[in-house]
Amino acid sequence: MSAAKRWKEDLQAWGIPQEIIDQAPESPWIHPPVLFQIPNQIELTPSHQKAFEALPVDGSILDIGCGGGIAAFAMGTKAGKVIGVDHQPEMLEMFTENANARHIKSRIHDGFWPAIAESVESADVVVSHHVVYNVPEIVPFIEALTTHARNRVVIEMPQQHPRASSNSAWKYFWDLDRPTAPTPSDLVDVLKELGIDAHLLLWEGKLPVEQDLDEAVRFMRIRMCLPASKDDEIRKFLLDNPPSENRPLATIWWDL
């Protein structure tokens, strides 16, 4: 089996069983914008540093799945132009507001990558943080990143699927065992198949979590496909199982 096919099958194993989806009061596929806002002072990570190295002064950076733009705006004034791609309009609004606040020229594109890639301009550096686990068709995604970068592509991803942190909750509320693959090494295998000589760095970073307990309960209820009547039980579960403040991360990058 090819690495790309294995990647796709491993991601498909993370799908929520249809019988659980069918009874869900709300769609579980949500990403609260509060978790994507960025601080005034961005703490540089290895992923930021790898992008910074390859970015010329007054260069351009293309941020795929940009959220509020923490990957792009970590470049500071070295970035003369930031380009954000996201499929959630509220994320793009945050991205534009953050660019304006920093007096950095920006442009946004609303849609899914690589479906809209032909309408998006190239950049000196292309970054994509915390996106690839949502991409079962990984080859065209990677190819579009590569063709849009003049100098370097930088990907940041957790060392485990982002929903792995909810595995214990799925077991508790639904008696559902969740997968463990794929991993960053599996993505590197895909890149090798594409003839890309990529580098992999493993490190540990901070985990953004919802600080408001009521909002955390609401978020878990929706993601777990549970009714509001379960809120008290969810609150107890969260108090008994506080989220970790740290998470293992990976940076993958390659040069053009």
Image (tube, rainbow, N blue to C red):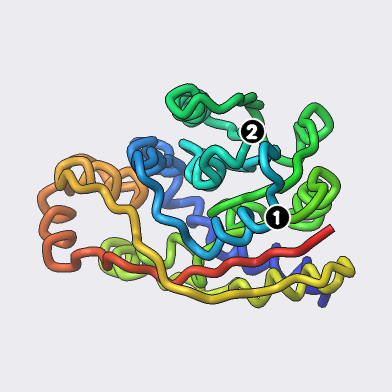
Along the viewing direction, whichever of 104 and 155 lies nearer the viewer:
104
Residue type at tag 1: Ala
- In this rendering, does residue 175 appear at all? no
Disc number placed over residue 54 in the picture, else none: 1
Side (left or right) of 96 relative to 33: right
Q: Residue visible at 72% across and 55% down?
A: 153
Q: Quadrant of residue 114?
A: top right
Residue 64 location in percent, x, y?
64, 42
Residue 146 location in percent, x, y?
81, 52
Q: Residue visible at 82% across and 47% down?
A: 150
Side (left or right) of 91 relative to 87: left
Disc number placed over residue 80 in the picture, else none: 2
Residue type at tag 2: Gly
Side (left or right) of 244 relative to 232: right
- In this rendering, does residue 62 appear at all? yes
Local crowd at mark 2 within 10 Å, few (<14), some, or many (≥20)? some
